[in-house]
Amino acid sequence: MMIQVQNEQAVTASQTKPALNGYHTKPSNSTPRSLYDVCRELREKVDAFLAEEPETSLLRNVQAQVRVSMGVVEEALSRYSLEQIALSYNGGKDCLVLLIIILACLARHFPSPSKSPSDANNQNGSTNPASFPDKFQSIYIVSQHPFSEIDDFVASSSAEYHLEVARYVLPMKKGLEKYLAERPNIQAVFVGTRRTDPHGEKLSHFDPTDAEWPDFMRIHPVIDWHYAEIWAFIRHLSVPYCPLYDQGYTSLGGKRDTHPNPHLKTGGGENGEKFRPAYELIGDDEERLGRDK
């Protein structure tokens, strides 16, 4: 039975929408869209996905995960104002899924720029008087030896999704300390950690930081997502992603500790080894095989 489920996931992950990732490094020539326009479009895409009758158990599981994650995001938005909350964003697949879900939730939680807060309260029952933001706060802790592809994708996607990115080339703890010193209003940070990540096993949806770390609430809306579910969501909704994933990288870090996943190796070619794309991997336990210990 386990083999049958994995085979179904493999087929679904590779066939749920286009193979091209839609990534671009140069700004689009199309008319700039506001954050509200982006959020509304993503909300419509996510709602349409949730309304589908999925053909596979994998997509049914993804729908269930999306509903749980949206509930966590909605709870966070009710606990914290936009001035108090940020996203940890490094362009990786997990925080990318989290970003899409956050923005989809913003479209429902806050009134559009054309409506007054009282109009929005009457429409959706929200009691939050905040107007729709122009940008969403985020922090990018850069690897000591970063891939240019990751930096380019963070820049491109941050512009597309209207992220206000604070970029730090520092160790994680020092970067967070500096970020909170510069933005003392921040009380909570969305994090794309999943259960199979290092130190993710015992996390819940809301966890204060550990002792001796900068003090804030860590919010983990995608903590219980599986690797195949992350890729099924990205590909089914045609979300552009970092091009390194098409080169066999399945977990992104720095150049000196990150390699294509050996389980995706297809053999040699004119330029050496070749690898299948990341979305063809299935098992959670194989995701970090391209990372040095």
Image (cartoon, helix red, strand yellow):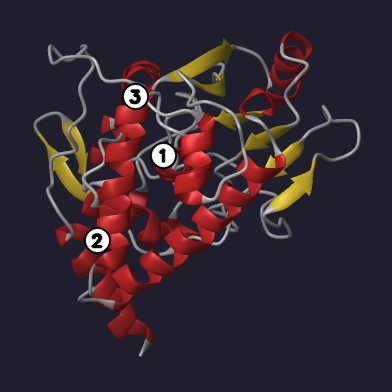
Viewer can see residue 166: yes
Q: Amino acid at mark 1?
A: Ala
User: Does residue 288 appear in this view?
Assistant: no
Give residue 270's quadrant in the image.
Answer: top left
- Label 2 sits on residue: 13
Q: Of the residues under marks 3 and 1, which one precedes in the sequence? A: 1
| Circle 3 residue | 157
Q: Quadrant of the N terminus?
A: bottom left
Q: Amino acid at mark 3?
A: Ser
- Say which amino acid is labelled 2: Ala
Nearer mark to the viewer, of 1 and 2: 1
Callout 2 environment at 10 Å: few (<14), some (14 to 19), or many (20+)? many
Helix, strand, or loop for circle 1?
helix
Relative to 139, say whether 222 is above or below: below
Q: CA distance from mark 1 to mark 2?
A: 28 Å
| Residue contact at pointers 3 and 1, CB within 8 angstroms | no
